Amino acid sequence: MTLDPKALPDVQRTQALQALAHREWDMVIIGGGITGAGILLEAARRGYKALLVEQRDFAWGTSSRSSKLVHGGLRYLKEGQLGLTRDSVRERQNLLREARGLVEPQSFAFADYQGRKPGRWLFQLGLAVYDWLAGQRARHHYPADEFLMLAPHIARTDLKGGLCYTDAKTDDARLVLRVLQEARGLGGVAINYLGAEQLLRADDSSDGRVSGVQLRDAAGGGVYQVHAKVVVNATGAWADILRQQQGAPRRLRPLRGSHLVLPAWRLPVAQAVSLMHPQDGRPVFAFPWEGATLVGTTDVDHGADLQQEARITEAEVRYLLAALDFQFPQLQLTRADVIATYAGVRPVIDTGKADPSKEGRDHAVWMEQGLLTVTGGKLTTFRLIALDALRHLESLLPPPNPTQPDAPVLAPSSPLPVQGGLATQQRQRLQGHYGSLAGAVVAAAQAGELSAISGTETLWVELRWAARTETVVHLQDLLLRRTRLGLLLRGGGIEHLARIRAICQGELGWSDARWVQEQAAYLALWQQHYSLPQDTPTDTGSKHV
């Protein structure tokens, strides 16, 4: 008996977990973010018996709290990271081609002002290299009058013109879920709310080699032991926690990136607008995302407990609002315009640099007593990271099934028929988000559920589909990761909770008491971690803002 992607009643979940504990696995992957999901997909493609476990929800950590950009890392050119930029640009192009509707092009506009850095010629040189790496050429520079048509709300004093270039954006949590969907279709198994409690050692190993993991079910409380030929630590910023069970030294520097979400009508940007912050010269951006406007990001040392959800600080709010006031003075944006906030912790390898922004963003792979740790890196390059991890494990695993080196990252999905009044962009979005299941999502819709929720691009039926099929254990899973309504609607979507309940409670099989409990917990979580700070605490982790 194995777990399917549906949310299972408690008894069935327990039985399924007991069955999984009796199987011999080739690979157990700890961590349900984009790195773990990518490794599971590539392992399943090669025919390995692979199990992924996540102590909370899929994409709970960094992979639902990123800047939502699938980018080549233009700023990494300045740091001399040409290889990382090259790989990122190529993977970006692959995802744009293969995940249309989930990974979409996003043009960026950068204003050129008299006396501000970087100047036009230096920026154009970087963009020329960027284009060369992508195998394309494009016009970049626009005089002031043309540039103001592309970015009409920016400051005009001393404006000489501007430059434009193209990157890409995504819904990071949905990208994780799409990759997991592909992996499950190939035989991979992924379970959320199943945490790695303790590494197991092989009895016949003189060096204490890792041979499995003791798991604790956060949903049901049971404890299970699973054994595997290899164990992969893909827990990102949390990777040192498992490594320290091996006696390994800490090697990660958790950095927090925080963001603001504003209504599109208050900060209307057709192009993404990028600028260098007047305080420290770090890049800040504002771009259209899922029907709202996203503003980010900070880059500060995160000194808080990693087991607690990250939250934006008052200093970071002021930092981002100062950037908006600097670039869009005529809009007079204030705290009252902010719909929601979110913060994520990046897994960055610590090299001791004083400025956290100067730390490298490449990934690292370490083998320590049979535990393979994969951490660092970028959302864009998740496939390359997965392939690198599997190369390190080749000698410990059975011969893999043959694979095509140029196989797409994500399998193509069939076009949706023109029905239900869905616009072309909506059909494309569903295909990108749900792949081969997009038709089933549409077929699940009841009356009125193929319309979009006001202020977002999310369709009501996506709530029903998630509740029915996508392993929703808590209401926060549904509203913060399966959909992003908790980020896109004021108060976390409180005004829509009655209709959400009418659609989802029966699909989830929750009693009235359970729904009331979940709703209260969700709203408390949203208020604590996704709203503006209600106080101004001293935050030792924000010293570089």
Image (cartoon, grey):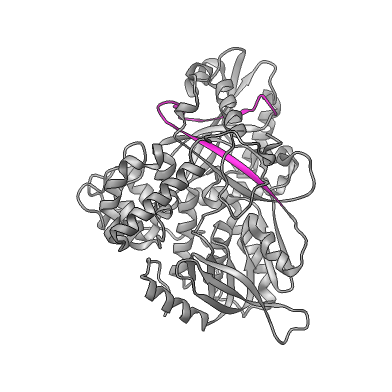
- Total marks placed: 0
Q: Which residues are magenta?
A: 253-280
Front position in the image: 419 or 174? 174
Q: Name the image quarter holding the N terminus.
A: bottom left
User: Is residue 263 on the magenta stretch?
Assistant: yes
Q: Residue furthest left?
A: 447
Q: Image check: 272 left or right of 81? A: left
Q: Nearer the viewer, residue 463 or 310?
A: 310
Whether residue 250 is in magenta: the answer is no
- Quarter holding the C terminus? top right
The residue at 51%/60% (across/down) is 56
Between 459 and 95, which is closer to the camera in this rendering? Answer: 459
Residue 312 can be seen, yes or no: yes
Q: Is residue 417 visible?
A: no
Vertical placement of residue 152 versus 404, above or below: above
Locate residue 389 relative to residue 175 in the image: left or right.
Answer: right
Which residue occupies 29% across, 61% down?
511
Q: Is residue 470 above or below residue 97?
A: below
Q: Is 324 located above or below residue 240 in the figure?
A: above
Q: Position of residue 208 (x, y in %)?
A: 74, 79
Residue at left offset 49%, top offset 56%: 176
Give the image location of residue 369, x and y in percent.
74, 73
Q: Position of residue 530 (x, y in %)?
A: 49, 42
Q: Is residue 416 left or right of residue 327?
A: left
Q: Residue furthest bottom?
A: 204
Picture residue at 67% right of the left edge, 15% below the top = 114
Instruction: Give residue 188's position: percent from left, percent from top.
Output: 49, 71
Name which quarter of the figure residue 395 lies in: bottom right
